[in-house]
């Protein structure tokens, strides 16, 4: 299956009930050969409206922080574990996660990132694959709101930027 096919499948997915309470499936975006992949839990209201991941307040904060540390959002792949938003932005159920995970696994298989950055709670639900370096970072929505979390997030993104540079030199 190609990345385009996955995108189409997500956009028309009815495997769980979340499509009934959302406007758009949000497959993810970024280059097919991205070396770095960011994974969040599931889209929020702004993402649901636009069909794009991390474009709301938390997304803008993420993009800004990446830029500050020399990481270009356009060069990384950004997606979520669960591809539809949930009513009142509730946490996706274990069943919804299990049902949606094959999309993420296919995206990882096709894109073959060297580094996966897990944003907040997605760290608990994303299966680890050998040969990929995982970074668990504070979710940008928490980083945006709390000073201590923001400092931690900035330190984590600085470490990530360093690791990306090292990999580019290999
Ligand atoms: N939070 C997430 O976890 N994912 C998004 O796409 C937006 C906000």
Image (tube, rainbow, N blue to C red):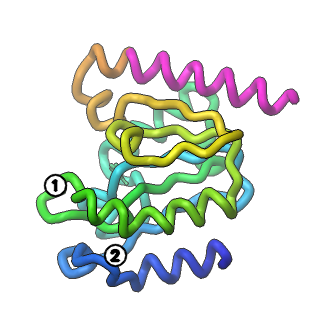
Screen quadrant of the N terminus: bottom right
What x and y, as percent, mark residue 28?
50, 62
Q: In the image, which residues are magenta?
A: 152-170
Task: Check disc 1 and report its element: helix, strand or loop.
Answer: loop
The mark nearer the N terminus, 1 or 2, is 2
154 within the magenta span: yes
Most foreground residue, 57 or 168: 168
What x and y, as percent, mark residue 118?
46, 39
The reply, left or right, for residue 18 in relation to residue 67 is left
The reply, left or right, for residue 116 in relation to residue 156 is right
Callout in the foreground (1, 2):
1
Q: Can you tell me whether the CB of the residue at mark 2 lies under 8 Å from the nearest atom of ligand 1?
A: no
The reply, left or right, for residue 86 in relation to residue 67 is left
Q: Considering the whole magenta stretch, tell me its main secondary structure.
A: helix
Label 1 Cα neighbours within 10 Å, binned few <14 / some 14-19 / many ≥20? few
- 8 relative to 31, above or below: below
- 157 relative to 94, above or below: above
What x and y, as percent, mark residue 89?
18, 56
Residue that numbered label 1 is attached to: 90
Label 2 Cα neighbours within 10 Å, binned few <14 / some 14-19 / many ≥20? many
Res 70 quadrant in image: top right
66 within the magenta span: no
Residue that numbered label 2 is attached to: 24
Most foreground residue, 154 or 122: 122
Q: Residue at x 56, y 20 (%)?
A: 158
From mark 1 to mark 2, how far is it between C-alphas?
Answer: 17 Å
Whether pointer 1 and pointer 2 mark residues with C-beta atoms closer than 8 Å, the reply is no
Q: Residue at x 74, y 56 (%)?
A: 33
Residue farthest to the left?
88
Most foreground residue, 25 or 61: 25
Which label number is shown at residue 164? none
């Amino acid at each position: 299956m190609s990345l385009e096919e996955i995108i189409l499948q997500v956009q028309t997915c009815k495997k769980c009930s979340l499509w009934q309470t959302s406007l758009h499936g949000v497959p993810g975006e970024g280059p097919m050969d991205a070396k770095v992949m960011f994974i969040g839990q599931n889209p929020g209201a702004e993402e649901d409206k636009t069909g794009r991941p991390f474009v709301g307040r938390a997304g803008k904060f993420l993009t800004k922080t990446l830029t500050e540390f020399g990481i270009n959002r356009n060069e990384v792949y950004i997606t979520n574990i669960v591809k539809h938003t949930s009513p009142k932005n509730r946490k996706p159920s274990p069943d919804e996660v299990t049902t949606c995970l094959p999309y993420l696994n296919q995206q990882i298989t096709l894109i073959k990132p060297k580094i996966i950055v897990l944003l907040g709670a997605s760290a608990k639900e994303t299966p680890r694959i050998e040969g990929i370096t995982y970074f668990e970072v504070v979710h940008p929505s928490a980083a945006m709101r709390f000073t201590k979390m923001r400092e931690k997030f900035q330190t984590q993104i600085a470490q990530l930027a360093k690791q990306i540079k090292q990999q580019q030199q290999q």
